[in-house]
Structure formats: structure tokens, C-alpha cells
Amino acid sequence: MKNRILLIEDNEETANMVKDYLAGEGFEVCSFRDGKTVMESALDFGQYALALIDLMLPDMNGFEIIKNVRKLSTVPIIIITARDGDADKALGLNLGADDYVVKPFSLIELTARIRANIRRAGTGCNRMENAIIKIRDLEIDAARHCVRCLGKTVDLTPTEFDILYLLAKHPGQAFSKERLYELIWKEPYWGNENVLNTHINRLRLKLRDMAGADTVYIKTLWGIGYKMEEF
């Protein structure tokens, strides 16, 4: 499972190029050309280490597939897109994707992003300790990779969990965007503000849905970054 990749890409040339290259890098790639087939196949997404999803598909756009996958699994998702606009990237990330690459992309970069996302999902900061952190109505269980708010489970992706866990371990401590990105993504920041901001916003929305609009766990420090509020 750790080396099995789900690829949803309708362009045959691109799909074959990605599949052949990743095979040479030790990955097993299961390829689909349309979203309908994926959704009707009743795939067990837990059998995959990561999903690569093209946004431009003939029958169902990638946004719909991401939404459907996220209802069933927290498998890391990387968007493959020819759309270079921030709005499309933000929408994909808001729907639950973890990262994106823009066509035409470097296969070396794609492989590096795949490895980074798989590593983060399997060996992120949340796997390093077994502590249970309690902050107001939040309970964060690292060993079980579980977050509960007011007694109800909060459904987080591995990236969202890692961000929350890191901030919660250091309540009141300010993290610059650059430092937070490098600690979570395990790669240089390079100004990837859109990716980080979208994950933070999505995490806040999930916590707000549970705790109520008046409860703010993660505070923005303008010009600096973020911190977990001390209650």
C-alpha cells in the first residue's frame, strides 16, 4: 500500500509518462481516465498511499472527485492541473486536496511532492509522541490520530492534524508562515503562502463548525504567522 498511487488523468500521453516514471521510482500506479469509472468502481482508497487527480476530466471535474474521495478517506491528494489561477488551486485545497502541481510539470518535482506527502501522512509530527493534548473543548490524541471537540470527532486530513497538533503543543508560541510550512511540509517554503493559508482556513472552519463561531483556537498574527490561543 505504501507505494501504490491512484492516478486520475484523461490525457493518455501524460498518464503514461507519469505512470512509467513513477514505476521507475518504485511506485505501483493504478490509472483511470475518467471520474465516473473511479466513483463506480467502489475503490478502497485506503489501499493507496496517495491520489493524483487531474482537474480537467471529460465527465466529472476533479473538484467533484476530491469531494467524493474526502467523504470516504483521508488519503493524501495532489491536484494535477493546467489551471494556474489561485482561485482553482484554493478551491481544490479547500475541498480537501493537500498539494498541487501545475502542467507542464517536472516529473522530478512531482515525485518529490509525492514522497513528501506520503511521508507526512505516515510519519508526521503527530506520530512522534503519544500525548493527549487538551485545550479548552479540544482533545487531541496523537496515538489514535483523533481530535474531538465538545465530545464529537473532528474529521481532519493528515496535514490538518499535523498543523493543529504542532500549534497545540506550543500554545501561545508564534510560528512564522515560513517556519510552520517547513515543519509540516518538510521542504523549503519558497513563498507557498496559498497552500498554508488554505489549510489553516479549512482547519479553522472545521473547528468553528464544532465549537461555534465565537471560539477561536488559531489566531492570525498579522505580518508574522499563527499561534494557538492560550485559554
Image: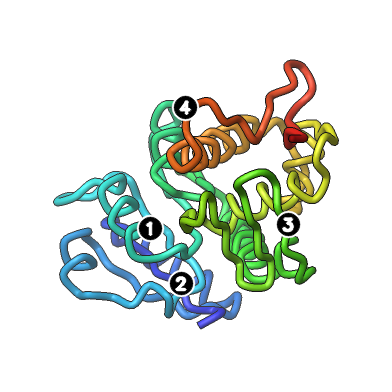
Counting labels gives: 4
User: Distance from label 3 to label 1 (Cα)?
Assistant: 45 Å
Looking at the picture, tell me which residue is in the foreground, 159 or 34.
Answer: 159
Say which label, 1 or 4, has the lower sequence index.
Answer: 1
- Which of discs 3 and 2 lies nearer the camera? The answer is 3
What's under tag 2, amino acid-wise? Answer: Ile
- Which of discs 3 and 4 lies nearer the camera? The answer is 3
Say if mark 2 contacts mark 1, CB within 8 Å: no
Looking at the picture, tell me which residue is in the foreground, 123 or 151.
Answer: 151
The residue labelled by disc 4 is: 86
Judged left or right of residue 86, residue 231 is: right
**For the point 79% across and 69% down, which residue is it?**
129
The residue labelled by disc 1 is: 14
* Quadrant where the image shows the C terminus: top right
What's under tag 4, amino acid-wise? Answer: Asp
Place of residue 117 in the rendered image (x, y in percent of width and height, measured from the top left): 61, 60
For residue 193, what is the image quadrant? top right
Say if mark 1 contacts mark 4, CB within 8 Å: no
What's under tag 3, amino acid-wise? Answer: Ile
Place of residue 134 in the rendered image (x, y in percent of width and height, measured from the top left): 70, 53
Say which label, 3 or 1, has the lower sequence index.
Answer: 1
- Which of discs 2 and 1 lies nearer the camera? The answer is 2
Say if mark 3 contacts mark 1, CB within 8 Å: no
Place of residue 85 in the rendered image (x, y in percent of width and height, measured from the top left): 43, 27
